[in-house]
Amino acid sequence: MDTRALLQELNERHDRLSPCKLKESATHAVPGDGNPDADIMFVGEAPGKNEDLEGKPFVGAAGKFLNEMLAGIGLKREDIYITNVVKYRPPNNRDPLPEEVEACMPWLHDQIMLIKPKLIVTLGRHAMEHFVPGKKISQIHGTAFRRSFDDMGTQVFYALYHPAAALYNGGMRETLMKDFQKIPAVLETLEKERGGPSEKAV
Ligand code: URA
């Protein structure tokens, strides 16, 4: 089976067995979208209203902004894989509860292990917190970190502000766009090096 078929099977299995309580109120699961063989995986927070209706991540205003930034570095949605920490919409777009994040996390870890991206770009505070805990997004945005996990081995994370938060905030928007522009250079550096021991990757 190719990665696409394996990923579809993985997503269907997790949706079927998910212990996340948000499943009860959601219209659709939003497992993820894009290229299962991508070098770059984007991880947002949780689906919003439009995502819940379509079953696809980042299809609303934040998604449009994300597509524009991708185009700015010569990429299309089909070149990357995009998903969220939480796979079901929290009611009224409230922040996901810690138990909802915990319930959805094995799904995300399994996706990462199957896709094996070279770089995981976290969008916003919630996505970053699980992988790079104890840091402030305002201090580490635009920085890549290498972290090791029992199940997923060593992965590299690049923290960005969330496009929805930056959309209507001029200063944050500019910072996000600048950090985004650095993604190809981060990837190039990772491809050149052999994964040294430093916790700060790039
Ligand atoms: N915000 C997110 O974090 N994820 C989506 O899919 C849409 C908006």
Image (tube, rainbow, N blue to C red):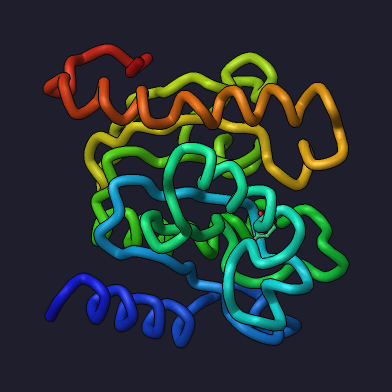
Name the spot of residue 96 as percent of width and height, x first. Answer: 72, 56
Q: Give the image quarter of residue 141.
A: top right
Residue drawn 69% across the image and 19% down it: 138
Count of numbered circles on the image: 0
Residue drawn 51% across the image and 28% down it: 181
Location of the C terminus (image quadrant): top left
Residue drawn 54% across the image and 31% down it: 180
Name the spot of residue 31 as percent of width and height, x first. Answer: 49, 72
Name the spot of residue 17 as percent of width and height, x first. Answer: 45, 83
Location of the N terminus (image quadrant): bottom left
**152 in relation to 61, above or below:** above
**59 in relation to 198, above or below:** below
Q: In the depicted view, which residue is nearer to us: 179 or 159?
A: 179
Residue drawn 48% across the image and 49% down it: 42
Name the spot of residue 164 as percent of width and height, x first. Answer: 76, 47
Q: Give the image quarter of residue 36.
A: bottom left
Residue 143 in the figure: left or right of residue 110:
right
Residue 113 in the figure: left or right of residue 164:
left
Q: In the depicted view, which residue is nearer to us: 185 or 145?
A: 185
Q: In the depicted view, which residue is nearer to us: 106 or 185?
A: 185
**Picture quarter with ligand 1:** bottom right
